[in-house]
Image (cartoon, coloured by chain):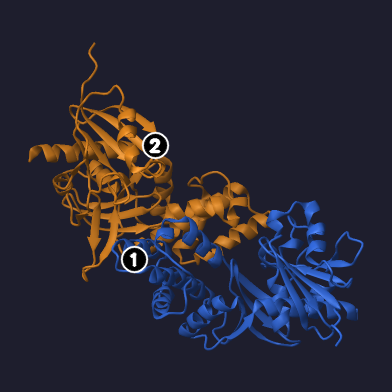
Chain colours: A orange, B blue
Amino acid sequence: MTMAQAHLIGVDWGTSHLRVFRIGGAGAVLEVRASPAGMGSLAREGFEPALWEALAGWEDVPVVCCGMVGARQGWVEAPYARAPAAPADLAARMIRAPTDRPVWVVPGVAQYAASGDLDDVMRGEEVQIAGVMDGNATGLVICPGTHSKWVDVQGGRITRFRTFMTGELHHLLSQQSILRHSVGESATASAAFLAVVARSLDGESLSSALFSIRVATLGQRMTQADASAALSGLLVGAEIAAARREFAVGPSELVGSPDLCRLYAAALDLAGFGRATLRDAGEATPHGLWRIWTEASRT
Amino acid sequence: MTMAQAHLIGVDWGTSHLRVFRIGGAGAVLEVRASPAGMGSLAREGFEPALWEALAGWEDVPVVCCGMVGARQGWVEAPYARAPAAPADLAARMIRAPTDRPVWVVPGVAQYAASGDLDDVMRGEEVQIAGVMDGNATGLVICPGTHSKWVDVQGGRITRFRTFMTGELHHLLSQQSILRHSVGESATASAAFLAVVARSLDGESLSSALFSIRVATLGQRMTQADASAALSGLLVGAEIAAARREFAVGPSELVGSPDLCRLYAAALDLAGFGRATLRDAGEATPHGLWRIWTEASRT
């Protein structure tokens, strides 16, 4: 028995994580490693050694990176591609890192307003989208997370998107605010969660509803689990309420962590979007990197 | 010349501050001291020594305290008075601290829903309100801050109120979120602030508008000062937009720090509430403590 040979190394490098993928001939992921060496913990001269350490013992094949590593404050700046952007546009704008071995960094995508002003940006989600939307696919993709993205894809191109700070608000409120005494574990798509999503879709005010979670746990009529459900329900509901004023209501591809995707899928269904297709970002990212690399090899 | 004699010591004791007031015959504040010995920095056995240290050299007259010091997790629990609540109701429910010298703690106010569930709470603002609303006053009082309170006062009683987590959200977002790179000093009631208040009153989504501040500073079309104005404008605007669905639109008394009151006054005027009267919380609190003490002495 011979070990399958890697053709590409994919790297997902964000502020708080580094994940590397050994990718075989047809884009199959052969092996995955995760390291805590996120950008946030590294000085500029620390990036290259951290990468080689993460790849120790793997084949000397091309490396393609995505995520905040390509931001101005990252390792190698890969200036944004402009929407509408297809995987081939990302491939054409990859930047070579100053390393002996070939390492490339995929750009993010920027959207401009009619006035010419920068309107929104993404870094990393464009690769997940390349990983789940085939050649000429059209539809709505939602990437829930720290900075959730709602993305219109037309004929395989990212045409329009909007960012919501939902995950970051959830983190700050559950860890650092007065609500940290009230909420427990991560929420699931419970009846309590859906009841609060419904109130939030009806336009309930976030900042008074947040305090009401504190009051309800003070009054001991709400458990920690229900308080977690209420916090997530308010934030996810507010995101969907705002997004449905800007995006067509209909089925979507949800790309993210499986738990978070299940939560969003239940809320989207309640909001009238129908059934979403759930895609694991841990698979979408190496698939997207393979696809972008394939586009680059074609030219 | 003789020094005016104190008749009462007022104490405003919150999570992060301790302020003490020497109060003379007619309720006049003769002297103020501030100490960093907030509740958050003290164990239960530390409260009494911290108080005596703050009052060193002052007359041995009765002491009346308000604020989170009377919460369950504070020094001496003073259970909430139930709305509707007048200063006399607060006076009747003061709790004596376990000290040799007479020290009293003023209760907060709790509001219950028709179902009997605890609906909202305040601790400290009830004293500010007693300080600015005379005997039979009726009107809207707004206490902007970490947890902003909108309060209906009828015939001198607190009849109904709602809390908004505006100040806490502002603190978390400006200090701990990705926006910390974008915003500068505290906002003033500038044209930039009012433009964003107007958008927020029109129902703009908070979590996408927050990220747009980050994008606008990335694109370098927005200064730090305008980013601060935008963050405050979004949060204050969202509070007023929600509150005006629940409270009658009209003139109000604004009680808080002078800078914050000026910001709210401009936003309230824009939202159709007319001109607010600005009251400094640093004066309202000792005045309210004096008034509650006077009520207690009557019985």
Task: Say which residue label 2 marks.
Answer: A37
Task: Nearest to the eye among marks 2 and 1: give it.
Answer: 2
Residue in front for this viewpoint, A251 or B281: B281
Indicate the quadrant where residue B198 lies.
Answer: bottom left
Residue in front for this viewpoint, A236 or B201: B201
Q: Judge the density around disc 1: few (<14), some (14-19), many (≥20) Cα neighbours within 10 Å.
A: few
Q: Work out which quarter of the rendered image holds the C terminus of chain B and state it.
A: bottom right
The reply to whether label 2 and label 1 mark residues of one chain is yes
Residue at image coords 66%, 61% = B16
The chain containing the residue under callout 1 comes to: A
Q: Work out which quarter of the rendered image holds the N terminus of chain B and state it.
A: bottom right
Task: Say which residue label 1 marks.
Answer: A245
Q: Could you say where residue A167 lies in the image, as x and y percent from the top left?
A: 43, 52
Residue B48 falls left or right of residue A43: right
Compared with B34, A174 (above or below) is: above
Residue at image coords 54%, 84% = B249
Residue B203 falls left or right of residue B171: left
